[in-house]
Image: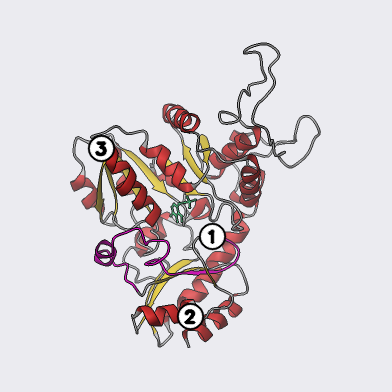
């Protein structure tokens, strides 16, 4: 017994996350998707095969994951890539020299690096604006604009853009909207339901959930867009290996349980930090006085476990002391795993953004980012308390 994709789409989230892409293996009945560790498939005669020719183009483990990605994001099609950056790369390859992209001025540093250091050399223009104000997006559109790229909430400043409003602007201008949904995950937010054309994920983060895989994903509804992106996937070749696909498939099964705990711990830690006498600002989109709280509340089901904060002593030395003093929060890049991580965006995840640009947009040298894991919240709070001192 296994549920078909359309039947599953009508069920509740927990059921969808557990059963997405899962079909008993026809040759053995194995309940878990086998890891098809193969590069090619034997053909009976030239062109006479079982639908699989070469593993860059088709792999059954990847196909199971791609079906799962579609199910969890309420989309029709999913495509898996070798990393989140590879998925982003595929979206920009839909464009031609001379085309313009409107994107946020606060985003993951690797996305900024891909846009500004790689694709701008190929004649694609990127306009970095504050997309939290939807009217800025409207004003920035020109006849050359082909794509709007938003990350919401943003990494690391937790800014929120209004997906519905920007999707309406994009539709009117006949421009594609792609939403990086890495921070929110489909547990909290489904951009396709709000009018986005493409959802992008760094599956490395919450979808995988255990800090043991690098992977990216795209989900969409339009069959032509799917064909174009599939063509780019197989032509450019940034496909994930089958073991990695298996790991993300396994991660998705517990996404709802993990996210519930990330949200609960995130809420406790955000409030703890906020009342701490040595802490200055806490950036978390669940605070009622967060500048885009109403938008966040209208498009997210809860507020997650990602947050950033600054100390009243906003020096790099004071931040470094905290970054080096935590015992449960490990100092590392990445996020979204079951274990808590602490990170210094200015020198780690966002070091590729020029300092003046960073500071102008609010990413100061003393900013500390937390990926709150699902350990016991009291232990996490005690760890931060001893580290902040
Ligand atoms: C919001 C966001 N988007 C995209 C990426 C890139 O993903 P990957 O590291 O899987 O290439 C990251 C990685 O940190 C990220 O945080």
Q: Nearer the viewer, residue 366 or 14?
A: 366
Q: Nearer the viewer, residue 263 or 340?
A: 340
Q: Residue at x 36, y 39 (%)?
A: 92
What is the crowding at mark 2: few (fewer than 14 residues within 10 Å), some, or many (at least 20)?
Answer: some
Residue named by callout 2: 272
Residue 336, disc:
1
Task: Decide whether residue 357 is among the magenta residues.
Answer: yes
Secondary structure at badge 3 equals loop
**Stretch of the chain drawn in magenta:** 337-365
Residue 79, disc:
none
Q: Residue at x 36, y 78 (%)?
A: 316
Q: Earlier in the sequence, mark 1 or mark 3?
A: 3
Per the model, the C-alpha gap separating discs 1 and 3 is 34 Å
Residue named by callout 3: 123
Some atom of ligand 1 lies within 8 Å of the CB belonging to the residue at label 3: no
Q: Nearer the viewer, residue 227 or 35?
A: 35
Count of picture labels: 3
Tell whether 42 sits left or right of 378: right
* Residue 326 in picture, x, y percent from top left: 54, 78
Task: Decide whether residue 128 is among the magenta residues.
Answer: no
Q: Residue at x 62, y 71 (%)?
A: 375
Tell whether 30 sits left or right of 128: right
């Amino acid at each position: 017994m296994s549920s078909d994709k359309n039947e599953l789409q009508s069920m509740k989230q927990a059921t969808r996350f557990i059963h997405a892409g899962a079909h008993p293996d026809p040759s053995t009945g194995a309940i878990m998707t086998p890891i098809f560790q193969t590069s090619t498939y034997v053909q009976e005669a030239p062109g006479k095969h079982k639908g699989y020719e070469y593993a860059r183009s088709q792999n059954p483990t990847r196909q199971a994951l791609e079906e799962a990605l579609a199910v969890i994001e309420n989309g029709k099609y999913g495509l898996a890539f070798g990393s989140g950056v590879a998925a982003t790369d595929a979206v920009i390859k839909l464009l031609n020299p001379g085309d313009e992209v409107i994107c946020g001025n606060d985003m993951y540093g690797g996305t900024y690096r891909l846009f500004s250091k790689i694709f701008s050399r190929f004649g694609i223009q990127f306009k970095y604006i504050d997309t939290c104000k939807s009217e800025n997006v409207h004003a920035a559109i020109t006849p050359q604009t082909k794509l709007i790229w938003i990350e919401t909430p943003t990494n690391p400043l937790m800014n929120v853009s209004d997906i519905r409003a920007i999707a309406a602007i994009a539709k009117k201008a006949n421009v594609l909207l792609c939403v990086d949904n890495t921070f929110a995950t489909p547990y909290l937010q489904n951009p396709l339901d709000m009018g986005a054309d493409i959802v992008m994920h760094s599956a490395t983060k919450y979808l995988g959930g255990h800090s043991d895989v690098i992977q990216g994903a795209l989900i969409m509804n339009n069959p032509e867009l799917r064909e174009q992106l599939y063509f780019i996937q197989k032509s450019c070749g940034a496909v994930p290996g089958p073991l990695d696909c298996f790991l993300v498939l396994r991660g998705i099964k517990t996404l709802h349980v993990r996210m519930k705990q990330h949200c609960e711990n995130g809420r406790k830690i955000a409030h703890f930090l906020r009342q701490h006498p040595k802490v200055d600002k806490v950036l978390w989109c669940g605070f009622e006085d967060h500048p885009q709280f109403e938008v966040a509340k209208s498009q997210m089901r809860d507020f997650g476990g990602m947050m950033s904060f600054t100390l009243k002593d906003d020096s790099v030395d004071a931040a470094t002391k905290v970054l080096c003093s935590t015992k449960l929060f490990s100092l590392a890049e990445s996020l979204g795993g079951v274990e808590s991580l602490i990170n210094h965006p200015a020198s780690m995840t966002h070091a590729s953004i020029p300092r003046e640009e960073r500071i102008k947009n609010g990413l100061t040298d003393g900013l500390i980012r937390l990926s709150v894991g699902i350990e016991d919240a009291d232990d996490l709070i005690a760890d931060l308390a001893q580290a902040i001192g």
